[in-house]
């Protein structure tokens, strides 16, 4: 195992085009934001650049805001593991909004871990469109 400390940088964070998990191409970056409108099929997340960690196991996790299944049980966070493919590798971690919208609103947190340590994390606030307008109007009233 390499004794080098992994170098991880979040390159882009926000809204992306739909991701094709069967393609090696990363989704197209559309907008930098942490405020995500609760709209069906909107893709959001981040692209991280990972260096000095080839062949190491990386764990990813997406913590959802108490989303429930059809039986009303809260879903566990979505997680998995992947081996880092090269010494200069880009990885997309993201999710999309699906129906019903009501239980998708709230704070979403996405993390990457290498050797048990969080090396990248980003939180997003998924909210209804009218909440976004209220936030913008708040700052406009203050002259920003």
Image (cartoon, grey):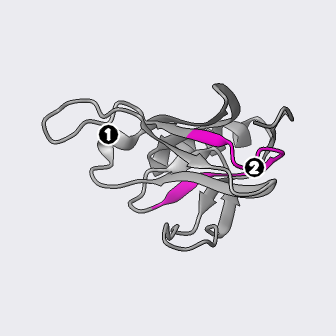
Residue drawn at (68%, 42%) of the image: 56
Chain part drawn in magenta: 42-59
Disc tally is 2
In the image, residue 136 lies in the stretch drawn in magenta: no
Whether label 2 touches label 1, CB < 8 Å: no
- Image mark for residue 103: 1
Q: Nearer the viewer, residue 13 or 40?
A: 13
Residue drawn at (80%, 40%) of the image: 143
- How packed mark 1 is, by other alpha carbons closer than 10 Å (few <14, some 14-19, many 20 or more), is some
Residue 3, image quadrant: top right
Q: Nearer the viewer, residue 90 or 43?
A: 90
Residue placed under numbered mark 2 in the picture: 54
- Which of the two discs, 2 and 1, labels the residue nearer the N terminus? 2
Question: Is 22 above or below relative to 127?
Answer: below
- How packed mark 2 is, by other alpha carbons closer than 10 Å (few <14, some 14-19, many 20 or more), is some
Label 2 residue SS: loop
Question: Is 91 above or below relative to 121?
Answer: below
């Amino acid at each position: 195992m390499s004794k080098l400390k992994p170098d991880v940088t979040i390159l882009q964070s926000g809204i992306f085009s739909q991701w094709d998990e069967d393609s090696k191409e990363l989704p197209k970056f559309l907008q930098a934001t942490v405020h995500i409108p609760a709209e069906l099929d909107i893709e959001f997340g981040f692209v991280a650049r990972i260096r000095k960690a080839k062949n190491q196991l990386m764990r990813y996790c997406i913590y959802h805001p108490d989303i429930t299944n059809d039986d009303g049980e809260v879903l566990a966070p979505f997680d998995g593991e992947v081996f880092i493919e090269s010494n200069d590798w880009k990885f997309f971690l993201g999710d999309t909004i699906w129906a019903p919208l009501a239980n998708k609103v709230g704070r979403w947190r996405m993390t990457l871990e290498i050797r048990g340590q969080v090396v990248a994390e980003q939180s997003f606030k998924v909210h209804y469109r009218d909440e976004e307008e209220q936030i913008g109007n708040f700052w406009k009233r203050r002259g920003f």
